[in-house]
Amino acid sequence: MDMDEEHGPFRVSRRTVLEGTAAVAVLGSIAPDLAHAEAPPLPGARDPNLSVRIPVTLTVNGKDHALNLDPRTTLLDALREHIGLTGSKKGCDHGQCGACTVLVDGRRINSCLSLAAMHEGDQVKTIEGFAVPNAAGGHDLHPIQAAFVHHDGYQCGYCTSGQICSSAGMLAEAKSGAPSFVSADLTASPRLTDAEIRERMSGNICRCAAYPNIVAAIKDGGGVDPDGEISL
């Protein structure tokens, strides 16, 4: 039985054949041009047109550092990669763990979330600047550092530099009267109870879970009496 072109088993018409032939001819003519076209750059590939550097002078632990940085360089990367102060750790690099905490003009910040170029003229303090010079020409541990050692406020130690920097900033905030989310009275001077310290330090994660020791170290090193008053 004969099948015509309109009702055959595959329903192939003369028009379909002609259209397919034309498409093959067109694609065949442009394929060589596509093969030689320049491929788009891979994500993250270095673009020489973006290799811009700007002069930035950072004052870190009382010392000036003149740098030439990509304007996208974070303060954390400037400290670690350009100045060589590796005490500040890169943990999550998203401002969620607190391992990169440093003090800027006395206030604690996540250095992974802040651009280095923003801090020209600021006083930056890292964990390397906490030790106190002594009469013998050496250095003594800062009271908070000594308290972390005494109370074993660390295990692996990766978060410790951020914990100590954050502790110093937190104590200054509390001493100035700044309340926290758990402060019962927003107008009175806060008392650093365990709950207050835990809330105020909640941005610093210890994956080893040494939190009871960290709280004890902060209370000891910060001169917090049993009533939560800060004496230092």
Image (cartoon, rainbow, N blue to C red):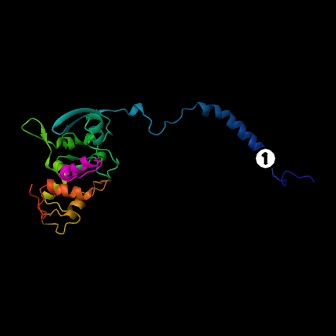
The answer to whether one can see residue 148 in this image is: yes
The single residue placed furthest to the right in the displayed view is 1
Q: Please, is residue 185 above or below residue 128 in the view?
A: below
What residue is rendered at 69% in x and 37% in y?
A: 26
Q: Please, is residue 85 above or below residue 145 in the view?
A: above
Q: Nearer the viewer, residue 32 or 148?
A: 148
Q: Please, is residue 24 above or below residue 92 in the view?
A: above
51 to the left or right of 196: right
Specify whether residue 136 is painted magenta. Answer: no
User: Pointer 1: what residue?
Assistant: 15
Instruction: Give coordinates of residue 50: x percent, y percent.
Output: 38, 34
131 to the left or right of 163: left
Instruction: Give coordinates of residue 141: x percent, y percent.
Output: 15, 44
Q: Please, is residue 155 above or below residue 230 in the view?
A: above
Q: Nearer the viewer, residue 195 or 27?
A: 195
Q: The magenta stretch spans which residues?
A: 148-168
Report the quarter where the C terminus lies.
bottom left
What residue is rendered at 20% in x and 47% in y?
A: 103
The single residue placed furthest to the left in the displayed view is 135
What residue is rendered at 78% in x and 46% in y?
A: 15
The answer to whether one can see residue 126 in this image is: no
Helix, strand or loop for disc 1 = helix
For residue 19, what is the image quadrant?
top right
